[in-house]
Image: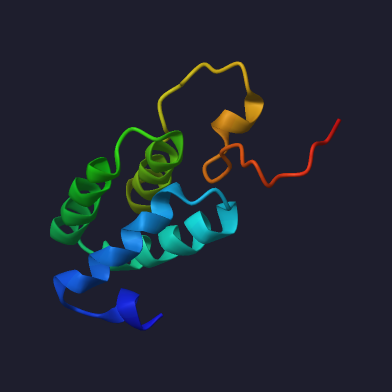
Amino acid sequence: GALAADPTPRRERILFAATDPHWRVRYALAQVLAEWGRDEPERAKVLALLPEMGEDLRVIRLRDYLQFRWKGELPPERPASDPAAFEAFWAPSPHRPSST
């Protein structure tokens, strides 16, 4: 929305969505960040902001997605016991209905 389109540093307030438990929120954020990173200097700025969110799996996968989208770089292998951990936007949510 309006905050994401703000050309001032206030737009960075939307980054809290990087750890949202709902994949659709993170996907929407990824689309905005991909747009912000249309050129290399802006990409570096976007990627520099994300580590401030910590090493949450959701943030790591968001960085992976952006690198893939911008440069075509596949993410490194990260073995995990939960197959959902490999998905770019899916991190287990307490709101996800159980499939068992």
Residue 9 position, x and y percent, is 16, 70
Up-down: is 68 above or below 15? above
> Count of labels shown?
0
Q: Quadrant of residue 99?
A: top right
Q: Quadrant of residue 16?
A: bottom left
- Classify the position of the N terminus by image quarter: bottom left
Residue 45 position, x and y percent, is 16, 55
* In this rendering, position of residue 9 left or right of residue 80: left
Residue at the (52%, 60%) spot, across then down: 25
Residue 88 position, x and y percent, is 52, 42
- Classify the position of the C terminus by image quarter: top right
Residue at the (63%, 32%) spot, across then down: 84
Snapshot colouring: rainbow
Q: Quadrant of residue 61?
A: top left
* In this rendering, position of residue 61 left or right of residue 9: right
* In this rendering, position of residue 60 left or right of residue 26: left
Residue at the (56%, 38%) spot, across then down: 91
Residue at the (15%, 76%) spot, across then down: 8
* In this rendering, position of residue 61 left or right of residue 13: right
Up-down: is 30 above or below 92? below
Residue 40 position, x and y percent, is 18, 56
Q: Residue lying furthest bottom in this view? A: 2
Q: Nearer the viewer, residue 82 or 67?
A: 82
Q: Residue lying furthest right in this view? A: 100
